[in-house]
């Protein structure tokens, strides 16, 4: 069962349940009396609202089927329903002429019914159907990342895989053992370690299995598919030559046009908000309004990044901002929570220093510390961005090890970068726009 098909199942299920919940609401509320006319009155307004609900559910990652526990799933569904409900009520009462109704009891009943149905649907599909329909695989090889991946699959069977057998020693293994394992478990998918010695009995057998309906996947790609990041420890320089395109002229030109157009529009629209922020900063603390920091850009060339100042002047401390950092001013804390401190970066986008989407530009001092991470220089072959794949999948780095983890996501983005992936990152960023971060 492919990842896209699973997402489609969850999506179509929610669409159907939205309309089923509306039908149930009208029957319960009016005991079926004059159902046709009531349905006609509610169908179009609620259909418009349903687009908003599906969008919110997407923002809350409910179509990623990554949730590992039922309580976590319930919490996510409740938050998504509450958020959707709040936005819907706001829309109904701000634009009553557009929708033609302002439901109160009906909407509350609808939201309650959908909450129960949607949670039940996601729980049934994710924890029962997806788990029972998991594809059986045999893994050949052993490494710390393989061990980590196997543990993750065993804890999350709903992601679509079940380990039928794990054969660690692939160098001296009897080829008959592989055949026996395939037949015993009726397996059609082998995942092999990337650095098997060429010419061994195992590799010759694996080659022959291709003609017998056996799919063979190297561990690099399997790990990438499961985690949506790159297994740095398993890579060699040859992987980058085969998988990384350093120059994509058409994509880069189109992206630059989009950057210029939207940064100019946003700068004009948000100028009053930026002026208000500047006034609050000036009145609340001494020091400059803007914070100018030297960051590492494309090809590791330094540039000046602009943000609203959120810390006290002449502060000292670690390069990373910490939780409850005493250096942050009260106004600065508000600007960070709402991300308003990022608005001056629109100037950087206009100048071409950064894009809207790309790896987060690090301070030059931090980039110097991180250069010893494996393949860190690859991060600089693309223009950095205000938000990126690492930002929507992982917390801000506050240590060298966390920087290593974010690098896995950054290289994944560089490999797969496209306008579609940029759009997905932009949509996911909306979810985090009003969340606290410490960077």
Image (spheres, rainbow, N blue to C red):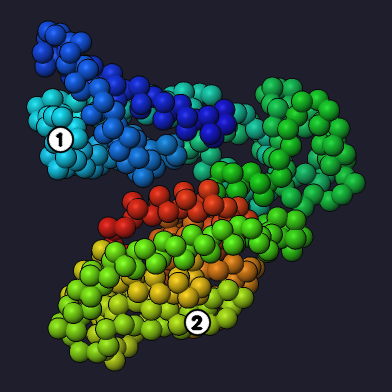
**Residue at position x 35%, y 43% from top?**
60
Residue 412 in picture, x, y percent from top left: 58, 55
Determine whether the residue tagged by mark 1 lies in a helix, strand or loop: helix
Residue at the far right: name it: 199
Location of residue 202 by image quarter:
top right
**As drawn, 105 above or below 320:** above
Q: Mark 2 to mark 1: distance in Å? A: 50 Å
Judged from the image, the secondary structure of the residue bearing numbered disc 2 is strand
Asked if residue 287 is positioned above or below residue 202 in the image, the reply reads below
Q: Provide residue 312's location: percent of width, then percent of height.
A: 24, 85
Neighbour tally class for label 2: few under 14, some 14-19, many 20 plus, Cα within 10 Å: some
Q: Please state which of residues 82 and 32 is positioned toward the viewer in this rendering.
A: 32
Q: Which mark is residue 339?
A: none
Question: What mark, if any, has residue 97 been given in the picture?
Answer: 1
**Marker disc for residue 303:** 2
Mark 1 neighbour density, 10 Å: few (under 14) some (14–19) many (20 or more): few
Q: If the image is split into quadrants, where does the N terminus sit?
A: top right
Q: Quadrant of residue 381?
A: bottom right
Closer-to-camera residue (92/331): 92
Q: Could you tell me which residue is drawn at 41 percent across and 61 percent down? A: 262
Q: Is residue 173 above or below residue 350?
A: above
Give x and y (percent) for residue 418: 57, 52
Tell me, yes or no, if residue 394 can be seen here: yes
Q: Quadrant of the C terminus?
A: bottom left
Q: Residue furthest bottom?
A: 314
**Residue sitting at 38 percent across and 84 percent down?**
292
306 on left or right of 364: left
Is residue 438 at least partly visible in the picture? no
What residue appears at the point 69 percent right and 26 percent down from the top-left corner?
Answer: 187
Quarter of the figure with residue 167: top right
Comparing labels 2 and 1, the label whose residue is closer to the camera: 1
């Amino acid at each position: 069962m492919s990842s896209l098909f699973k997402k489609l199942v969850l999506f179509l299920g929610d669409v159907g349940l939205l309309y089923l919940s509306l039908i149930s609401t009208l029957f319960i509320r009016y005991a079926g009396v004059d159902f046709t006319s009531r349905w006609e009155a509610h169908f179009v307004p609620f259909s418009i609202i349903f687009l908003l609900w599906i969008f919110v559910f997407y923002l809350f990652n409910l179509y990623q089927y990554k949730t590992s526990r039922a309580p976590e799933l319930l919490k996510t569904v409740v938050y998504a329903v509450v958020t959707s409900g709040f936005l819907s009520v706001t829309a109904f009462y701000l634009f009553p002429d557009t929708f033609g109704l302002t439901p109160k009891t009906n909407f509350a009943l609808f939201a309650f019914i959908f909450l129960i149905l949607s949670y039940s649907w996601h729980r049934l599909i994710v924890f029962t159907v997806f788990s029972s329909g998991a594809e059986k695989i045999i893994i050949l090889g052993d490494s710390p990342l393989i061990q980590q991946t196997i543990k993750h699959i065993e804890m999350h069977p709903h992601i679509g895989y079940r380990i039928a057998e794990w054969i660690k020693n692939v160098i001296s293994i009897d080829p008959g053992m592989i055949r026996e394992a395939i037949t015993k478990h009726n397996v059609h998918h082998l995942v092999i370690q990337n650095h098997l010695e060429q010419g061994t009995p195992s590799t010759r057998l694996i080659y022959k299995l291709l003609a017998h309906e056996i799919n063979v996947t190297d561990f690099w790609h399997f790990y990438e598919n499961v985690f949506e990041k790159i297994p740095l420890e398993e890579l060699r320089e040859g992987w980058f030559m085969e998988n990384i395109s350093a120059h994509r002229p058409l994509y880069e030109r189109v992206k630059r046009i989009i950057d210029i157009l939207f940064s100019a529009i946003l700068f004009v629209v948000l100028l009053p908000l930026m002026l208000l922020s500047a006034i609050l900063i000036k009145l609340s603390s001494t020091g400059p309004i803007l914070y100018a920091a030297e960051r590492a850009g494309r090809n590791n060339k330094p540039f000046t990044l602009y943000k609203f100042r959120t810390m006290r002047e002449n502060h000292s401390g670690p390069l990373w901002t910490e939780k409850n950092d005493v250096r942050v001013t009260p106004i600065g804390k508000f600007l960070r929570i709402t991300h308003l401190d990022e608005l001056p970066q629109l100037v950087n986008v206009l100048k071409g220093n950064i894009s809207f989407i790309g790896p987060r530009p690090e301070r030059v001092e931090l980039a110097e510390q991180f250069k010893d991470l494996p393949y860190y220089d690859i991060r600089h072959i693309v223009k950095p961005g205000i938000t990126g794949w690492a930002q929507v999948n992982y917390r801000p780095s506050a240590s060298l090890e966390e920087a290593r983890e974010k690098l896995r996501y950054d290289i994944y983005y560089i490999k797969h970068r496209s306008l579609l992936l940029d759009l997905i990152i932009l949509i996911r960023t909306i979810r985090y726009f009003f969340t606290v971060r410490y960077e």
